[in-house]
Amino acid sequence: MREAFGESFDVPTGYLNTASIGIPPATAADAVAAAVGSWRRGEARPADYDEPVATARAAWAELVGVASDRVAIGSTVSQLVGLVAASIPDGTRVLTAASEFTSVSFPFAAQHHRGVRVAEAPLSELPSVADEYDLVAVSVVQSADGAIVDLDALRRTRARVLLDVTQAAGWLPLRVDWADWVVGASYKWLLAPRGAAWLVVRDADELTPHVANWYSGEDPWQTVYGLPLRLARGARRLDLSPVWLAHVGAAASARWLRTLDLGEVRDHCVGLADALLTQLDLASRGSAIVALDLPEAPDIGPRLAAHGISAASRAGKTRLSFALYNTHDDVEAVLAALRRDQPGHNTAG
């Protein structure tokens, strides 16, 4: 059991895969377990989940710096990006980062039959060419290697902007209320189960509620049956029916995360990531995610796995991600694994 920022975590040394799956704080895991127990015993009632949904919505809104009445709920990023992609005008020119996560780019590319065109540019060049396009869709932190988009430069462009904060929210301080749309999912640095996601909208009326359902009504419990169509005002008219247990965990985790100084969390995570890079004689990158491709260690992924290091393989590199529950012990575990079996290394006690 580790203690970090006032919470407890059952996370082993060498777990550096938060960019794939975050480890929940004990209180969030306990909340989900209690909800499963109620379900198992037949005690759960659908209305019981309204409070966790509302709590998670409000906490996530605070983490990204927007008012909660601008936030719609869903279950995946692609699902919510798809609402935007299906609602933009025919012929819209979309710009995204080269090798962007496909949950951001594919929903727009799938609109090609309407003349929607998607182009890619290197992340560092995105702001400089954004004015040639109608809309920019990009992750704040790139999944493959942790590169961070220049938000200030992007904000100064004339293009409309959709941001995916899935790899950023929870460790990177954010205030992205200026963006036209912001999406994010629960299961990485928000340390919650997969199945909760959110969409910030500037103007909910410009998006067609293609997945309108009972939960997008002003009072969901009064819109369960029958016509006419009666949707909520504002962002809630875009709500999807919630994945209940995911929101139970998200409510517990996000409610705690929003009480933290995310500047301190960022410094902690980035400090560990940059410390590893420095020890490997590589340049610091200022991100919680690092991607390694070491010529002297071509089998780095299998080697780390053999020594109990949890990482991921992305875009031909080994991706390591540092969260608030990681410590310098994790950095040392990686370095020790890379030193072992090297020519001349003495493994004797």
Image (cartoon, helix red, strand yellow):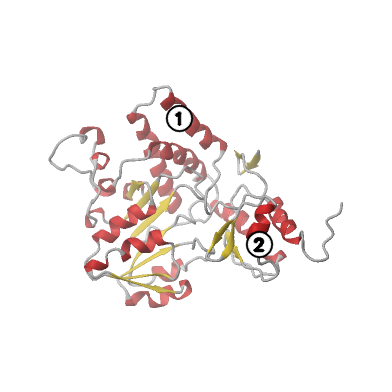
Provide residue 329's location: percent of width, then percent of height. Answer: 71, 51
Left or right: where does residue 135 sit relative to residue 347? left
- Apparent side of residue 180 relative to residue 219 in the rendered image (left or right): right
- Residue toward you, 315 or 82: 315
Say what secondary structure mark 2 lies in: helix
Q: Is residue 292 visible?
A: yes
Image coordinates of residue 56 in percent, x first then y, are 41, 42
Disc 2 residue type (three-letter): Ile
Q: Is residue 163 visible?
A: no
Q: Name the element at disc 1.
A: helix
Mark 1 belongs to which amino acid? Val
Closest to the observer: 36 or 128?
36
Q: Residue at x 44, y 57 (%)?
A: 165
Decide which of 347, 125 is in the foreground and name it. Answer: 347
Between circles 2 and 1, the one closer to the viewer is 2
Residue located beneath label 1 in the image: 36
Q: Position of residue 119 (x, y in %)?
A: 36, 73
Residue at point 33%, 53% (across, down): 80
Q: Which mark is residue 300?
A: 2
